[in-house]
Amino acid sequence: MKKLVVMFLALSLSFTALSGCGSKEADETPQDSGTDVSGEGEKETKTQGVDTASGDGAYKIGGIGPLTGPNASYGLSVKQGAQVAVDEINALGGIQLELLFEDDQADGEKAVSAYNTLMDQEVTAILGAVTSDACIAVTEESQVDGILQVTPSGSAQACTQYDNGFRICFTDPLQGKTMADYIKAQGYESVAVIYDNSSDYSNGIKEAFEEQAGAIGLNVATSESFTSGDVDFKTQLTKVKSSGAQCLFLPVYYAEVAYISEQAKTVGLELPYFGCDGWDGVIAQLNGDTTNIEGAVFLTPFVATSEAENVKKFVETYNQSYNAIPDQFAADGYDGVYAIYQAISACNGDVTNENIIANMQNIEVKGLTGDMTFTKEGEPNKSALVATIENGQYVAK
Amino acid sequence: MQYQSKIWVYGGLVLFFLWNRDINKRVNSTKVKELIILIMEVIAQFMNGLNLGSIYALIALGYTMVYGIAKMLNFAHGDIIMVGAYTLSIAMSFLSLPAPVAIFISMAVCALLGIVIERIAYKPLRMSSPLAVLITAIGVSYFLQSVALLIFGSQQRKVESAVNLPSLLIGGVEITGEAMVTLGVTIFIMAALTSFMKYTKTGMAMLAVAEDKGAAQLMGINVNKTISVTFGIGSALAAVAGVLLTSSYGFVGPYTGSMPGIKAFVAAVLGGIGSVPGAMVGGLLLGIIESLSKAYISTELADAIVFGVLILVLLVKPTGLLGKKRIDKV
């Protein structure tokens, strides 16, 4: 009985959300600024003048991500990147968007209440959540409401488990598969892996990597594990050294990359390095001294120093607004807004949840993180960007 | 009949010998090579373990000394290591002081910190239950971590090695300068500490306080001062451990000291807590067991094996390997 009531409430909520889509949204209610710790509130150019003669209201996009707590930088980046996209789109003069962003502190429960807050404000689509665990919690709610949910950076498989869920970033297994192909294509015969056994991220990549390596005949000479917080990698590196591998694949975060590359030198191991998107930030970690990892290649969705026209423009605008160089999360947030925008545009005025979600499979987004289309499962179809480290700089390859 | 069978047996033996020799010849070149590689690897892993173990031993020395004399487990010991490492990093990279001066400053800062912590946090609790002091020590540990987090942030900071020795290459096994210095320093400190306790007035006062605080006071020993000195020396040792730890691993963060601190505590218990040579033996054993089990059994099980060994030793010899039997007065 209770379930029925909940279902009914959820349904009615989604209908109100729908009916809100096409109507005028002229009321500029002051947003909840309690969660806004970044202090850039006044810099945001709010979408004023949505009440134009055409009667076209602004569609609200509900962002969810950590704005406070230890993972705050991820959420702030997504929020700021998304805001740049919203401003750009509004300047075009067609469909108007408005970004509402709620803090979830990367926590599942808080993400769900952030989601409910956004639904109360009648958003058209959800951009988030930024982190995987929070995102999975939100999918359970959003699939009931049937609203489009695009996660910029939730890489766990379950983030897109329902029909309404899509993602911008690569999944963990896809990263592993891509890197196995890449290493093989570089002409290497055997590879060693060092991975973090206590992290889903690292495990997910490593398993897919080994599977793909087996399929394409790339010999995994040894695969050594460690657990988060370990600082001594000499044992694993000594094993790698005697395994005769030609290169070393490290599906780990940048802090461990720093430890491993320092200690590899002390055990006399000099192999080419390959990595994943967790490497983003490794140069800062090493104080810019990249002699040990010179020439390392890693998979990343976005390189701020890229020469691509759209990336240059984005980096410039972002830097002007927030006085910072955008990272991959900002780029993911930017692309997420464009995906939602294009899905709404493709509705040709008949904006319903069903239409938006159906359109996601038809659109092609020319994003900062690559040109992408989306599969029915919600995964992006895009080519992997590969970055290399040269003279203390990330260079797009 | 008998003769014939004998021929068969001899013939068989000769054939077997020839066949065997043939196999040996064929296998020799690759098998022996593999064997040599394996032996080299085992030696290299052993050296890794020795390096890790001597750091554990160095930390355990401080642990065991404070426990042996003040009869309390100073769980903040690991975090004093972290403070020492940060001090070194600041002294070397910001004030650009030479390494020996930076190490000395780091030791002085930590010794002072140890004395202050003892005065503020532990001294008022000297008469209360050991559990209260233990909880306070854990509190101090979290306090130090949080302060470091506030000042330096969660990002790990790169530290230049304070040890400037080239690596030694012995038959394909590379031994880093840091590893040699760490082992040397640990042995030296152990010897110095033992003779300090035995032959100096302060050292003997420490032993007396360890034996019986009340009686020591009656004999005219200033118990408060002695315990302060103990904490000062223990914390200065922690600073040395911090210097060598960051020289070996290159980075310092707010939680740098906590895991080595716990492992060193295990080493101290393994060797017999309160015993200075015990800390040394326990630390080295722990490092070697950890390294070898990581390499040849399982990385995931390495810690389980280390703690399993601890449980086994304590079951057989509750006082630890070199611990003294203590008869508690009832």
Image (spheres, coloured by chain):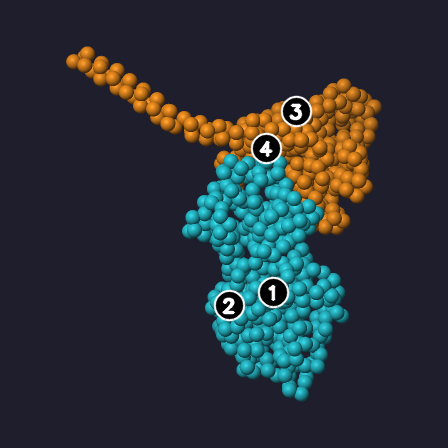
Q: Position of residue A97 (x, y in %)?
A: 64, 76
Label 4 sits on a secondary structure element that is helix
**Given contact means CB atoms under 8 Å apart, are the residues at marks 2 and 3 in contact?**
no
Residue at the spot of label 2:
A374
Q: From the image, state whether disc 3 or disc 1 is nearer to you.
A: 1
Q: CA distance from mark 2 to mark 3?
A: 65 Å
Q: Do tags 3 and 1 sit on the same chain?
A: no
Residue at the spot of label 3:
B277
Label 2 sits on a secondary structure element that is strand
Q: From the image, state whether disc 2 or disc 4 is nearer to you.
A: 2
Q: CA distance from mark 4 to mark 3?
A: 21 Å
Q: CA distance from mark 2 to mark 4?
A: 49 Å
* Amino acid bearing label 3: Pro
Image quarter of residue A53? bottom right
* Amino acid bearing label 1: Leu
**Given contact means CB atoms under 8 Å apart, are the residues at marks 2 and 1 in contact?**
no
Q: Residue at x 54, y 66 (%)?
A: A372
Q: Do tags 2 and 3 sit on the same chain?
A: no
Q: Do tags 2 and 4 sit on the same chain?
A: no
Q: CA distance from mark 2 to mark 1?
A: 15 Å
Looking at marks 2 and 1 on the same chain, the residue that comes earlier in the sequence is marked by 1
**Given contact means CB atoms under 8 Å apart, are the residues at marks 4 and 3 in contact?**
no
| Residue A368: assigned label | 1
Determine the chain carrying the residue at label 4. Answer: B
Residue at the spot of label 4:
B48
- Other-residue count near label 2 (Cα within 10 Å), few / some / many at <14 / 14–19 / ≥20: many
- For the question of whether residue A74 can be seen, the reply is no
Q: Residue at x 60, y 48 (%)?
A: A295
- The chain letter corresponding to orange is B
From the image, state the color of chain A. cyan
